[in-house]
Amino acid sequence: MSTTAVAIGTMKVAQVSKPGAAFQIVEREIPDPGAGQVRIKVQACGICHSDVLTKEGLIPGIQYPRIPGHEVAGVIDELGAGVAVWKKGQRVGVGWHGGHDNTCRQCRRGDFNHCENMKIPGIHYDGGYQEYMLAPVDALAAIPDTLSDTEAAPLLCAGVTTYNSLRHSGALPGDLVAVQGIGGLGHLGVQFASKFGYRVAAIGRGPENAVLAKKLGAALYIDSHATNAAQELRRLGGARVILATAPNSKAMSELIDGLGPNGKLLVVGASSDPIEVTPIQLITPLVRSLHGWASGIPTDSEDTLNFAELTGIRPMIETYPLEKADEAYARMMSGKAQFRVVLTM
Ligand SMILES: [Zn+2]
Ligand SMILES: [Zn+2]
């Protein structure tokens, strides 16, 4: 008889074998959690645009084959050595923040979001496009009972990014807050901004999402094709915050003049093109700023999930089975999904 651990079986995973390759559905052995880890029986995993980093190999040093996915919702089904707080059967999520080292300079300051050795699921270790996933305990967020797995998953990246950036933005209830882009991030940004008590101006290109934006809580909708959105915001007194969600640097640049006094362009939509702004625009006659924001730590994710439960905020999703990861990913990349694509296991 062998004394080594016996694998309890195999599982299906959707992996990328090399940069640019299509997803492969393969069988792997179900892994055992190491010390400080749990094994999660994955129920749902959102497909985020940032999964392109793994799919196309845009970050150096990714080891292939790699399984993407950092919007993971599931149930703990096994505990590794030394795991005391979390329990088998507990519903948990894993987002972009996949663990920190607790020892670097930033962690010693308590700034885990800037850990110099932060791990990202799906990049530094296998993520959620699989039936079972290992995760360190410092990546876990508890999921409240009333949120389904498919609803919780997108809140663990798109949700926490918009919720956490807005709640730290300095905008106060009643302030004019614009949300640029009604998409995967923006449709959540509008909901959070509305529930925070802001006067929300949703900005889209074309009239298509006007009705939806108002349904999600926007007080007004600005069609940036039909009107000069910056001028419109200034006419309304100037935005305290513009949450820039659509990864379109030109569209972001065009909005800067719509900021009011001490207004902030809060950038969460990731694009590699430059935002254009003159120093004068940031200095006179009004002082304004550009500000980036990325996600949050697992307790921020928990706050996001709890706030969504409290207020009824939900992502709009399209679901695909894990086996159709390729089709689901293509749907996300097409920009036509309404609005987040979620894999189910
Ligand atoms: Zn993401
Ligand atoms: Zn650290």
Image (cartoon, rainbow, N blue to C red):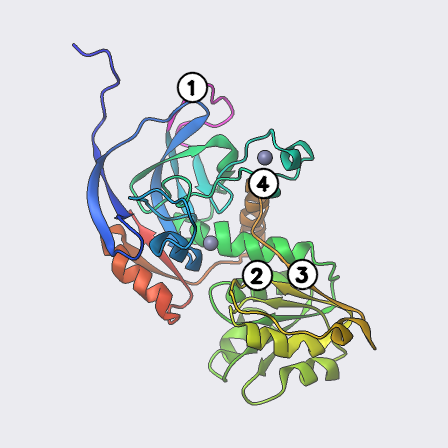
Work out whether mark 4 precedes mark 1 in sequence or the reverse, and give the earlier one.
Answer: 1
In-image side of 29 versus 67 (left or right): left
Work out whether mark 3 precedes mark 4 in sequence or the reverse, and give the earlier one.
Answer: 3
Residue linked to disc 3: 291
Work out whether mark 4 precedes mark 2 in sequence or the reverse, and give the earlier one.
Answer: 2
* Relative image position of residue 229 (x, y in whole percent): 63, 82
Residue linked to disc 1: 81
Disc 1 to disc 3, how far (Cα)? 41 Å
Asked if the residues shown at circle 4 and circle 1 are in contact, with their CB atoms under 8 angstroms apart, the answer is no
- Compared to residue 77, the image places residue 266 above or below, namely below
* Relative image position of residue 31 (x, y in whole percent): 30, 30
The residues colored magenta run 78-89
For residue 135, what is the image quadrant?
Answer: top left
Asked if the residue at label 4 sits under 8 Å from ligand 2, the reply is no
Q: Nearer the viewer, mark 4 or mark 1?
A: 1
Count of numbered circles on the image: 4
Which residue: 61% across, 56% down? Answer: 293
Residue linked to disc 2: 268
Which residue: 53% across, 37% down? Answer: 117
* Relative image position of residue 311 (x, y in whole percent): 58, 55
Amino acid at dot 4: Thr
Work out whether mark 1 precedes mark 2 in sequence or the reverse, and give the earlier one.
Answer: 1
Q: Nearer the viewer, mark 4 or mark 2?
A: 2
Amino acid at dot 2: Val
Looking at the magenta stretch, what is its main secondary structure?
A: loop
Q: Nearer the viewer, mark 1 or mark 2?
A: 2
